[in-house]
Image: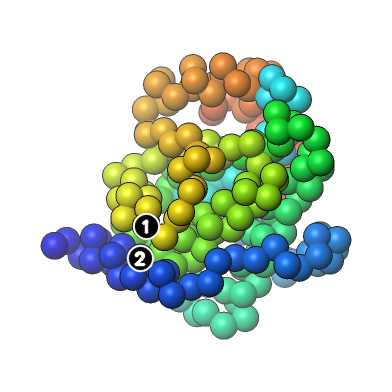
Amino acid sequence: MSTTRTALLVGVCLAVLLPWPSNAMEEEDILKWDPPTRLKKRFPYYKSGEDLDGAEVWIVPFGKWDDLDIVNDGGQRVEDYKKYYRQMYTRMSATNRNDDFSKHSVVIMDMDGFNQAKALSINGNLVAFDNLRTFQAYARNGGFKKGIIVNVNPLFEALLNLGKPILGRLGEFLDVYGTNSERWIPRVLKEIPADQLPKMYGGSKAQEDLTAFGR
């Protein structure tokens, strides 16, 4: 068995013991929380526009979020990190949650940059599972219409496949695409107009025209 697969399997086994993320913290409180500057600078995310139904479209470059030092340190650093992405999901989903399902937010999760160092980190895998389960918890409560994961390489695909037993109904809320953008961009553009997306996703927007959070 490869070292990478072993690390992923250990992460899955340990993740079984983790409680499901809770949305118990009041949304108003978590949105008022001012994250440490180091988190905001290192882990940006963006509001891109709206899909054909008028739902907000968000983009998170998860693959480029370099979090290994945080997840390996643990303690308050990792708790703040988890709180940071819970705040992110709250911000993304709060606006349209009370509208009909077609208006619930869409988030594009870009895994470009997910590498072997991340796949080999058991602590990193645990946090990745917590992140995905947090998204699912918000989606199940009406916060998201769907997530679109793009640029999924074999390493992240293995994490998703091995994690299926603990990720529950996550697949109901996700469209998963590989690294060939020529295949998935046309599908994304069937749901989101080109003028609502940056160029890297087949759109016409410049990166600086997106509403940035974090940095």
Query: Relative to 112, is 10 on the left or the right?
Result: left
Q: Are marks 2 and 1 in contact (CB under 8 Å)?
A: yes
Query: Relative to 96, is 57 on the left or the right?
Result: left
Of tags 2 and 1, which is closer to the observer?
Answer: 1
Q: Residues within 10 Å of mark 1 (few under 14, many from 20)?
A: few
Is residue 110 placed above or below 167 in the rendered structure?
above
What amino acid type should be assigned to the residue bearing mark 1? Answer: Pro
The location of residue 60, given as percent across then percent down, is 59, 45
Q: Answer with mark 2 or mark 1, whichever residue precedes in sequence.
A: 2
What amino acid type should be assigned to the residue bearing mark 2? Answer: Val
Residue 103 falls in image quadrant: top right
- Helix, strand, or loop for circle 1? helix
The tag on residue 165 is: 1
Q: CA–CA distance between discs 2 and 1?
A: 8 Å
- Quadrant (top left, top right, bottom left, bottom right) of the N terminus: bottom left
Query: Relative to 151, is 215 on the left or the right?
Result: right
Could you tell me which residue is drawn at 53 percent across and 72 percent down?
A: 19
- Helix, strand, or loop for circle 2? helix
Q: Residues within 10 Å of mark 2 (few under 14, many from 20)?
A: many
Instruction: Give the total of numbered labels.
Output: 2
Q: Is residue 38 visible?
A: no
The location of residue 124, given as percent across then percent down, is 43, 66
Pick the residue in front: 102 or 67: 102
Is residue 105 placed above or below 167 in the rendered structure?
above
The tag on residue 12 is: 2
